Image (tube, rainbow, N blue to C red):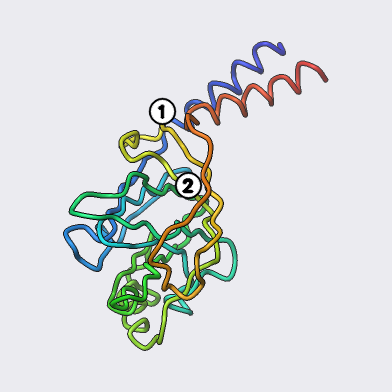
């Protein structure tokens, strides 16, 4: 019975991981001050995969009521991702969706007023009321964008390893940020990073194994 419970828990965890979708969002593609796409639908467990293009962008979760400012509760911040030439950053920034509520996000780069110029987006945005268009309109009146002091709320993933499904392996890097400014003027990145080789699917397997062992030893 206990062995059956362990197998069932592992199967449920694997099924959940396999059904999740990774949603690619390009940041500043082709020199545009925009997220592409800037409006997406996502279910709980899906992954937002932000890919950064030249010259230097970030992504910050915000609240509808306060455009171009970090969310008061929870949230995420990628840090600034400088890119030279016409390519994209070596790392993408992945955020796991944990609610179907609207999630607004923006670029906090103040050089050329990215957020104020409409560089923002939304996940599960409504069709009326607190829409992305209303958020962008209000952002035009903001003096400066701001961001948290350090990277949090997601993980940096080697861009070449990112795929369209969360079931694939991805090398990850954990970063501690020491020199980010909170006013969106951080045009240089200075992070201390370590670690690699974390696999998205393994999270579910480990959780299932731990759960099963707890039952087996109880």
The answer to whether residue 177 is left or right of residue 49 is right
Residue denoted by label 1:
169
Q: Is residue 160 left or right of residue 208?
A: left
Determine the secondary structure under disc 1. loop
How far apart are the alpha carbons under marks 2 and 1?
15 Å
Judge by depth and name the residue closer to the eye, 29 or 185: 185
Residue 54 at what x, y percent from top left? 25, 58
Q: Nearer the viewer, residue 50 or 101?
A: 50
Q: Residue at x 44, y 64 (%)?
A: 60
Left or right: residue 192 compared with residue 170: right
In the picture, the quarter occupied by the N terminus is top right
Against 1, residue 18 (above or below) is below
Task: Give the residue drawn at x 19%, y 54%.
Answer: 85
Whether 94 is drawn above or below 172: the answer is below
Q: Secondary structure at mark 2?
A: strand
User: The C terminus lies in which quarter of the figure?
Assistant: top right
Dots 2, 1 in contact, CB < 8 A:
no
Front tag of 2 and 1: 1
Mark number, residue 217? none
Residue 203 vertical position relative to residue 94 in the rendered view, above or below: above
Expressed as whole percent of the image width and height from the top left, the position of residue 38 reads 29, 62
Q: Which residue is mark 2?
A: 96
How crowded is the residue under tag 1: few (<14 C-alpha within 10 Å), some, or many (20+)?
Answer: some
Q: Counting other residues with Cα less than 10 Å from the Cα at mark 2, is it few (<14), some (14-19), or many (20 or more)?
A: some
Q: Is residue 81 left or right of residue 205?
A: left
Q: Position of residue 140 (x, y in %)?
A: 33, 85
């Amino acid at each position: 019975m206990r062995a059956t419970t362990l197998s069932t828990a592992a199967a449920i965890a694997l099924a959940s991981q396999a059904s999740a979708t990774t949603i690619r969002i390009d940041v500043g593609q082709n020199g545009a001050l925009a997220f592409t796409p800037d409006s997406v639908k996502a279910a709980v467990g899906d992954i937002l995969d932000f890919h950064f293009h030249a010259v230097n962008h970030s992504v910050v979760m915000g609240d509808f009521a306060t455009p171009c400012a970090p969310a008061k509760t929870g949230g995420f911040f990628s840090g600034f991702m400088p890119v030279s030439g016409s390519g994209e950053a070596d790392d993408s920034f992945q955020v796991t969706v944990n609610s179907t509520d609207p999630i607004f996000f923006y670029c906090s780069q103040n050089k050329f007023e990215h957020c104020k110029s409409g560089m923002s987006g939304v996940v599960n945005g409504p069709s009326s009321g607190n829409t992305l268009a209303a958020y962008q309109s209000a952002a035009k009146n903001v003096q400066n964008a701001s961001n948290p002091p350090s990277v949090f709320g997601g993980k940096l993933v080697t861009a070449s390893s990112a795929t369209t499904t969360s079931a694939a392996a991805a090398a990850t890097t954990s970063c501690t940020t020491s020199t980010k400014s909170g006013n969106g003027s951080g045009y240089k990145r200075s992070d201390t990073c370590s670690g690699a080789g974390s696999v998205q699917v393994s999270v579910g397997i480990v959780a299932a194994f731990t759960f099963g062992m707890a039952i087996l030893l109880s």
